Image (spheres, rainbow, N blue to C red):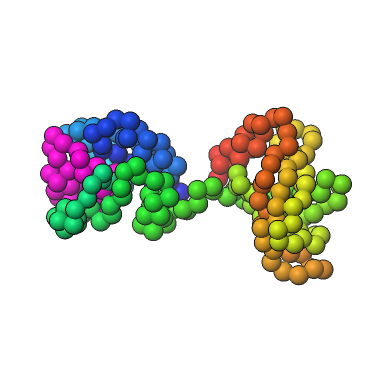
């Protein structure tokens, strides 16, 4: 799930663009504005579920903008971004519908945390995708089958004993157009269950051992499109 649109208002275009790039992680579309008037036009056009409003925005200023948003779009979530913030400013803006305040530069983890709580969107910085393929040790022994995968690691139903903090060389039999498995130096982060029954192992990637550095990103992009 993603938000339909997010509008970002900041008087500094570079700052607005940076925030826009972060919001693309959880929104299908983003727009930026460097003045209050432009910001209100973008909101009217896109009717976003959420906006980032810089308290330094002018023409009209952030207080006037927030007042209009409160009147016309009472259900819209407004996150205020600031370079300096006084308690009196917070007390004035909260009744106008600005419930969250984030310092500049707005960080992705902070934004994701708010978005996750409000809209139920995953707060993972590295989203996991359901996928199944075989995982082998470098000597050809089948370790198990994946349950899901992210850019940082895999969750595997294991058929062989694994131990936390174990470093291992693995071959991932990705279901892509390449015949050879993708070899990666990995570390076992944690395990659940006890042998001889299958266990669940969280495995982190340490180093991808391939000259084709686009293979994993391209495969993850395919998974994201399917999701």
Q: Is residue 68 visible?
A: no
Which image quadrant for residue 113? bottom left
Q: Which residues are magenta?
A: 51-80
Q: Residue at x 12, y 44 (%)?
A: 64
Closest to the observer: 16 or 173?
16
Percent position of residue 15, x then y: 32, 35
Q: Would residue 78 be counted in the magenta stretch? A: yes
Left or right: 102 as drawn, with respect to 172 = left
Q: Residue at x 38, y 49 (%)?
A: 111
Left or right: 38 as drawn, with respect to 195 = left
Closest to the observer: 100 or 39?
100
Q: Please tell me whether residue 158 is drawn above or below residue 47 in the rendered image.
A: below
Q: Is residue 161 visible?
A: yes
Closest to the observer: 76 or 139?
139
Q: Would residue 63 be counted in the magenta stretch? A: yes
Percent position of residue 35, x then y: 19, 33
Q: Please tell me whether residue 187 is drawn above or below residue 58 in the rendered image.
A: below
Q: Residue at x 35, y 33 (%)?
A: 17
Percent position of residue 182, x then y: 74, 39
């Amino acid at each position: 799930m993603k938000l339909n649109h997010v509008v970002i208002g900041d008087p500094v275009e570079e700052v607005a663009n940076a925030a826009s790039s972060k919001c693309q992680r959880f929104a299908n579309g983003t727009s930026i504005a460097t003045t209050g008037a432009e910001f209100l036009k973008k909101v009217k056009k896109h009717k976003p579920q959420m906006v980032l409003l810089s308290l330094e925005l002018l023409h009209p200023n952030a207080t006037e903008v927030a007042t209009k948003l409160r009147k016309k779009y009472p259900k819209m979530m407004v996150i205020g971004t600031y370079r300096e913030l006084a308690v009196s400013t917070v007390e004035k803006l909260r009744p106008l519908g600005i419930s969250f305040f984030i310092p500049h530069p707005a960080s992705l983890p902070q934004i994701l945390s708010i978005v996750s709580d409000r809209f139920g969107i995953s707060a993972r910085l590295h989203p996991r995708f359901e996928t199944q393929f075989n995982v082998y040790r470098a000597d050809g022994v089948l370790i198990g089958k994946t349950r899901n995968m992210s850019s940082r690691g895999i969750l595997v139903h294991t058929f062989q004993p694994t131990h936390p903090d174990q470093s291992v060389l693995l071959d991932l039999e990705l279901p892509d157009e390449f015949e050879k498995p993708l070899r990666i130096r990995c570390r076992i982060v944690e395990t659940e269950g006890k042998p001889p029954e299958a266990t669940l192992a969280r495995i982190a990637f340490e180093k991808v051992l391939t000259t084709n550095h686009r293979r994993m990103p391209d495969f993850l992009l395919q998974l994201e499109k399917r999701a």
